[in-house]
Image (cartoon, helix red, strand yellow):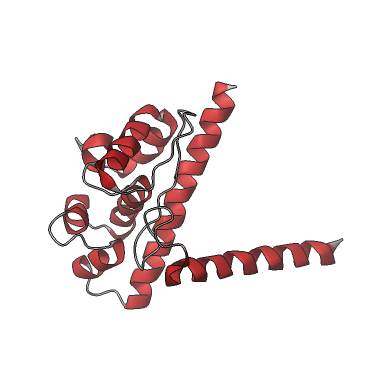
């Protein structure tokens, strides 16, 4: 029994690592509006059940994820502590390409004690830096490996926020 559990865990870990490497090297580029180095993928947390999903590009996609944020009270509750004082979720999200990029940026700002408005400006202003480049610009003391691990951590945290808020909304809506 223990041997099959170890094999299952090993296979799951290998699959995750292979998928992450494949995506990081362009295999998933464009699939969900991310895939490049330092870019957060979009996590589709559509609770409207309309069946429409966006690619994370264009102004319609940005408006769509902002509308989903407004309608997802579970996600809003999870993200509120990460927002700067006196900032609404919708105002903070404005300008980001997709939900995953926005939520990952919130986590990076919180994790690394970087002012969110500065990180947002780097990512959405002229030049549109990726999350990794924005971290490097604002925290030049971090090594490339440190930047990469912080991007991965924030991506993981963002994905967890969306998944857990969807699970909460599904169980409370049933």
- For the C terminus, give its image quadrant: top right
**Residue 39 vertical placement versus 116 (above, below):** below
* Residue 133 percent across, percent down from the top left: 25, 68
Q: Quadrant of residue 161?
A: top left
Which residue is farthest top?
174
**Residue 90 vertical placement versus 131 (above, below):** above
User: In the displayed structure, does residue 9 sit left or right of residue 37?
Assistant: right
**Residue 32 vertical placement versus 137 (above, below):** above
Task: Kindly identify the residue that appears in the image at 33 percent across and 36 percent down.
Answer: 64
Which residue is farthest right?
1
Q: Give 160 or 97, whichever is nearer the viewer.
A: 97
User: In the displayed structure, does residue 114 sit left or right of residue 111?
Assistant: left
Task: Kindly identify the residue that appears in the image at 21 percent across and 46 percent down.
Answer: 95
* Residue 107 percent across, percent down from the top left: 35, 52
- For the N terminus, give its image quadrant: bottom right
Q: In which quarter of the image is residue 18?
A: bottom right
Task: Kindly identify the residue that appears in the image at 30 percent across and 60 percent down.
Answer: 112
User: In the displayed structure, does residue 68 sit left or right of residue 121?
Assistant: right
Task: Kindly identify the residue that appears in the image at 22 percent across and 51 percent down.
Answer: 116
The tally of labels here is 0
Q: Give 142 or 104, whichever is nearer the viewer.
A: 104
Q: Give 71 or 117, whichever is nearer the viewer.
A: 71
* Residue 167 percent across, percent down from the top left: 55, 35
* Residue 88 percent across, percent down from the top left: 24, 34
**Residue 124 vertical placement versus 152 (above, below):** above
User: In the displayed structure, does residue 87 sit left or right of residue 168?
Assistant: left
């Amino acid at each position: 029994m223990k041997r099959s559990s170890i094999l299952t865990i090993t296979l799951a870990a290998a699959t995750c690592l292979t998928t992450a490497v494949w995506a990081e090297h362009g295999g998933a580029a464009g699939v969900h509006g991310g895939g490049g180095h330092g870019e957060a993928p979009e996590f589709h947390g559509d609770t409207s059940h309309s069946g429409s999903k966006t690619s994370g590009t264009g102004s319609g996609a940005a408006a769509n994820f902002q509308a989903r944020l407004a309608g997802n009270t579970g996600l809003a509750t999870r993200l509120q502590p990460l927002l700067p004082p006196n900032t609404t979720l919708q105002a903070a999200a404005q300008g980001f390409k997709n939900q995953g990029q926005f939520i990952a940026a919130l986590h990076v700002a919180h994790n690394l004690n970087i002012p969110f408005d500065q990180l947002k400006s780097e990512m959405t202003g002229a030049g549109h830096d990726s999350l990794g480049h924005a971290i490097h610009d604002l925290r030049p003391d971090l090594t490339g490996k440190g930047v990469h691990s912080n991007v991965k951590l924030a991506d993981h945290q963002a994905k967890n926020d969306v998944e857990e808020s969807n699970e909460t909304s599904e169980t409370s809506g049933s």
